[in-house]
Image (cartoon, helix red, strand yellow):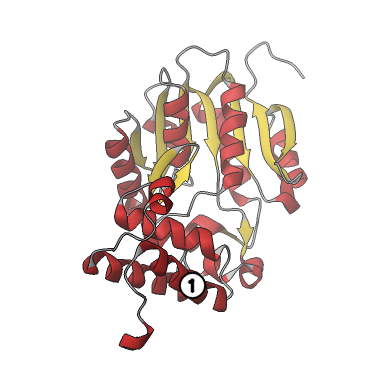
Amino acid sequence: MAQSELPNDSRQALLEWAQQRLRAAEQDAPRRTAEWVLIDVLGIDRGQLYARARTPVAPDAAQEFRTMVERCLEGEPLQHVLGYTSFRGLRIDVSPAVMIPRPETEEVVEAALRAVSSVEAPQVLDVGTGSGCIALALKHERPDAQVEGWDVSAEALAVARRNADRLDMDVHFAEVDLFAAQVGDQLARPVDLLISNPPYIPNEEAQTLPAVVREYDPPEALFSGEDPLRFYRTLATCASVVCAPGAAIVLETHADYAEEAAAVLREAGLAKVCVETDLSDRPRILTARYRGPTERE
């Protein structure tokens, strides 16, 4: 960047420069992005940012801000640039090893909380935990819960453990392959809630995804292979191994395959299978119950 292109190093001038660059590149929400990055660099809140808009920014901080904005301009997700995102009020660190948590998944957590609202000290298993956002949100909102998160990726689990340590939450994470034999041996006792946001995008849809998703989220967290129902079949089988009688099953799903995924759960003998819609009125959440010895449809 030529010296003549550099902004004056006041907060206001830096924001205006960043907004102009982001808008010219047709980036989403250029003002909000510029604000978030500068707030992060300066360690202040939005009110402080504008209350002292003409305050000079130290050269090192101004350069850090410009570098982060350039990363956004190159298409890198804002969450990766910042290194974190917000999920149900928690700061969740992210990296290229984990999928960036989505707002829709917050609704899956809400459905799970309803499902175990009457269970005292529920045992919870989050399969495909990634950053740990679901497991940690459940532990935050149900401190009495005993929560465990599984993932096949050691790199993802390292992120989840860092999040748990920083948030000072007692959540256990383990490297487990859902498709391996005897997955139930990993648990000390059956669970009252099995929750998962599994990979559900068929490979054929890869090119239809926004580049910011396709190029930055780990493919193993996105794609189900040729069969979009593969993980739902395995999770349904897993339920019979890891769930206590009457346990809740709450799964996020591809909106286009929600009814087919629900049929998979019914065929596996799960009870009270229901498809719930998200805030955009898209079928997104599957709920079910693992049959107890005396439970009937």
For residue 252, which quarter of the picture? top right
Query: Is residue 220 visible to us here?
Result: yes
Number of other residues with Cα within 10 Å of mark 1, as a class: few under 14, some 14 to 19, many 20 or more = some
Q: Quadrant of the N terminus?
A: bottom left
Residue 289 to residue 95: above or below: above
Percent x, y of residue 125? 46, 31
Disc 1, SS: loop
Residue denoted by label 1 = 75
Residue 180 to residue 219: above or below: above
| Residue beneath the point at 62% across and 58% down | 201
| Residue beneath the point at 39% across and 42% down | 91
Q: Amino acid at mark 1?
A: Gly
Percent x, y of residue 107? 61, 37
Q: State the residue in front, 193 or 62.
A: 62
Q: State the residue in front, 277 or 270.
A: 277
For residue 246, which quarter of the picture? top right
Residue 280 to residue 21: above or below: above
Q: Is residue 206 shown left or right of residue 133?
A: right
Q: State the residue in front, 80 or 261.
A: 80
For residue 147, which quarter of the picture? top left
Q: State the residue in front, 288 or 65.
A: 65
| Residue beneath the point at 47% across and 55% down | 99
Query: Is residue 249 visible to us here?
Result: no
Q: Is residue 60 shown left or right of residue 15?
A: left
